[in-house]
Image (cartoon, rainbow, N blue to C red):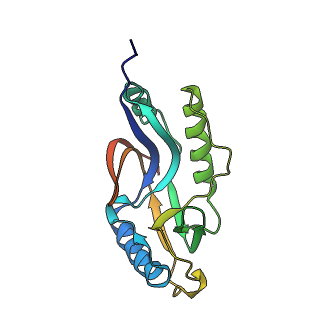
Amino acid sequence: MSEPRMAVRRLFFALWPDAGTVEELVGWTRLAHDVCGGRRMRADTLHLTLAFLGAVEVDRVPDLLELLRAPRGPGGALALDRFGRFRGPRIVWAGPSAAPSWLAALHRSLWRDLAGLGFRRPEESFRPHVSLLRKAGDGELSAIPPARPIIWDARRLVLVASAPRETGSYYQALGECRLAD
């Protein structure tokens, strides 16, 4: 007899923007879409991933939620001031020219805690960004009209379950904590 399959969910930890930041990011998705085409990210999906975990057995979710109860470092101001592109997956994103030290520290701290639970940190370096478009064309990013930087006061750390569908991924916040001022 075969073992029953354990239920899994596709999970990640992310910084989640406030309504004002979402509104500004939606404007940036329009600017980028006008130049690059593709599929615009819905307003309710805009976020900055800190740790993508992939398929995780549901019985591990309580341990992950416990990480949100542990003291976390401060959040802070994050200046999104440039567009970028991941060519392979055809993603156009907004990100900071330079990541603030609090963000790098939060990323390291979160992965240290996740490693204690048996999760492996990805080999590639952390490139903080908010995905704006998927399946984007080859439009020249320098042709996107310049916009003033978006200054995001990032305070919400969220554990999210993602359910991919043909029309895009749909997210459910499983838990969150407020980062210190």
Determine if residue 48 is in view.
Answer: yes
Q: In this figure, what is the number of numbered marks? A: 0
Image location of residue 51, percent across then percent down: 53, 45
Q: Is residue 148 left or right of residue 27?
A: right
Residue drawn at (64%, 54%) of the image: 101
Image location of residue 108, percent across then percent down: 62, 42
Look at the image and tell me in which quarter the N terminus lies: top left
Residue drawn at (57%, 58%) of the image: 128
Res 40 → quadrant: bottom left
- In the rendered view, tell whether residue 5 sits above or below residue 141: above
- In the rendered view, tell whether residue 10 sits above or below residue 171: above
Residue drawn at (47%, 68%) of the image: 135
Q: Nearer the viewer, residue 98 or 7?
A: 7
Determine if residue 74 is in view.
Answer: no
Q: Nearer the viewer, residue 147 or 91?
A: 91
Q: Is residue 95 left or right of residue 24?
A: right
Image location of residue 11, percent across then percent down: 43, 41
Q: Nearer the viewer, residue 112 or 9?
A: 9
- In the rendered view, tell whether residue 66 sits above or below residue 180: above
Image location of residue 126, percent across then percent down: 63, 52
Q: Residue furthest front?
A: 1
Res 65 → quadrant: top left
